[in-house]
Image (spheres, helix red, strand yellow):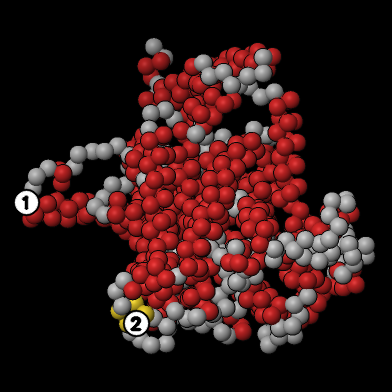
Amino acid sequence: MAAETQKKEILLPSERKMSFKERWGYTWHEMKRNSMCYLMMLPFMIFFLFFTVIPVVMALPIGFTDFDMAHFPPKFIGLQNFYTMFLEDDVFIGSIRTTLIFAIFTGPLSYALSFFLAWLINELHPVLKTIFTLIFYAPSMAGNIYFVWQLIFSGDAYGYLNAVLNELGITTAAIQWLTDANYLLGCVIVVQLWVSMGAGFLAMRAGFQGIDKAMYEAGAIEGISNRWQELIYITIPSMGPQLMFAAVMQIVSSFTVDLVGRSLAGFPSTDYKAHTIMTHAFDYGWIRYEMGYASAICFVLFLAMLLCNQLISKILGKYMN
Amino acid sequence: MAKKELKPSQIQAQIEAENAAALEALRKRREKEHRKMERSKGSNKQVGKSWKNDIGIFLFLTVLGLFMLAPIYIAIVTSLKPVNEIFIMPPRLYAMDPTFDNFKDLFVVANNSWVPFSRNVFNSIFVTVAATLFHVVFACTAGFILAKCRFPGCKAINKIIVIALLFNSQVTYIMQYIVMANLGMINTYSALIFPLIASTMGLYLMIQSVGQIPDAMIEAAKVDGASLLRICWGIVMPNSKPALMTIIIFQFQAAWNSNGGSLVYDEALKTIPTVVQQIAAAGMARQGAIAASAVVLMIPPLAIFIAAQSNVMETMAHAGMKD
């Protein structure tokens, strides 16, 4: 993690060879010395424990059970769910492909776009900065106004897009944007991109605002001659933590695309074209009440996100140092 | 000698005044040089900002911004259209006869339910303010500790936080419900507020941002005898203002839009999003009313966003700090 790599590594006495008792005694001493730290963390950690850690720990093993929310306790069935998932469930295999398409388009693309826009906005006058930050963040503030996108992509001539294309004479018949398998995925990706300038973008804006102006002056003296060099040698290295935060947020949002697809293309969508892994989990969890299987799906997705996170933090970590 | 009779404090004051004057002169000279440098840069269009570049950026952002705003614009226009205009073909991008009927309808229906709508408004405000306040205070304090203090368990907690951010299971909500049911919290305000306080995103952003504050600054404060709590709120937070404001925006928005419909069933405890959802599901699901509710719900987060963003100061206090 970037926050940790930034700290200087000090060889603690605990890293020397010590007997178990000695080591425990030392840890206890350290804990007592830092009691203020624990005390200050306590309020948050109590809430965190009860409403995040305990639910997550309770949810983890459900993937190895057969659980329909009515029969307690859940029946342990080992790896059965995972066998079914990879060997028998064709829709799941198809959803991996859809999720990857989404992840590629709305992950790296949206991440790069967020950074690029945050950077461009930063070059402007302070008042314009606020206005443009607002404009690009507005879609995530507007929340679930998917009904507007349904109006735009509507399959009859009432749809804005069809109306415009008809008026311009580009098309003569209305296109079924959200039910035609050829267009559907593209439409959902556009909407997902539209909504994706969220937490990551705002964090990057905050990162840009926090950069020390003197660094640029120093850079100019050291011989940096254009904005690109400034970006690569000064801006990006001093924004590591925000970039890492945005990356985590982007991983989460692009791997768990679900609601946009469901509310636009319907559920299930034509040919399962917009059927992501998360939609599959929703299907099994909340339509068929097979929570055990749904949890197993989520567990696989979680492992994929964890792997992706490790990879990105390695790359970012290497670049920042 | 007159000088010898000066008290130590006076001597110190004198030295400080001299230092300040010298610093001021130095600063002025640097600014002058800097301005000269900027001017020379402007001529060959490098590092410094040329207005031609700025206009290019402005135009580019405006075009992209129009695309971002278009759906929101359509939502607003739809909310102002009377019923007969919604089905005009082809659809118009403006309302010919704008009306507030949709908004009036929304409030009339909302007021005709079991509890007055003002009660739901109060619930929303109370839940949002409480969740935002406690989350920001707790998460900032904990974030500072996790970013800047070394103690047994610190690395493990940092790892757990990232894992909690990534873990997104269909059953987590059920488990959360079970925990809350066991604590006897269902159908109380705490069921709406407490899970929001535990939001991991704000904490993670704070940990990441506080990590950037120079250690020297915190060490200096420690040497001066400041307590950790004092360092956190007196020194670190004022220097992490952009991150602090960002957390407030995130949390306010999340709390305001949170739909605790499954956690409280008493009408008197429901918040606006839950009520609006009920109205939309109860047969009044017309485009106009949905659009009106979307527009109304957007206003408070927007106000907070503008207030918070204009509060972020461009120059950071630790700008002069060198390690």
State which quadrant residue B279 falls in: bottom right
Horizontally, residue B285 falls left or right of residue A287, namely right
Query: The disc numbered 1 marks a residue on which chain?
Result: A
Q: Nearer the viewer, residue B2 or A317?
A: A317
**In this rendering, which labeled residue sits more in front, label 2 or label 1?**
2
From the viewer's perspective, is A190 left or right of B173? right
The answer to which of B173 and A176 lies nearer the viewer is A176
- Is residue B33 in sight in this rendering? yes
Q: Secondary structure at mark 2?
A: loop
**A256 relative position to B154: left or right:** right
Say which residue appears at 50% left-offset and 34% top-offset.
A236
The crowd level at tag 1 (other Cα within 10 Å; few <14, some 14-19, many 20+) is few
Residue that carries the numbered disc 1 in the rendered image? A19
Q: Mark 1 belongs to which amino acid?
A: Ser
Q: Residue at x 56, y 65 (%)?
A: A275
Q: Quadrant of residue A70?
A: bottom left
C-alpha span from label 2 to label 1: 43 Å
> Residue placed at 58% from the left, 60% from the top?
B252
Q: Is residue A142 above or below residue B185?
A: above
Q: Quadrant of the C terminus of chain A?
A: top left
Pointer 2: what residue?
A: A74
Q: Nearer the viewer, residue B42 or A27?
A: B42
Would you place residue B1 above or below residue B235 in this image? above
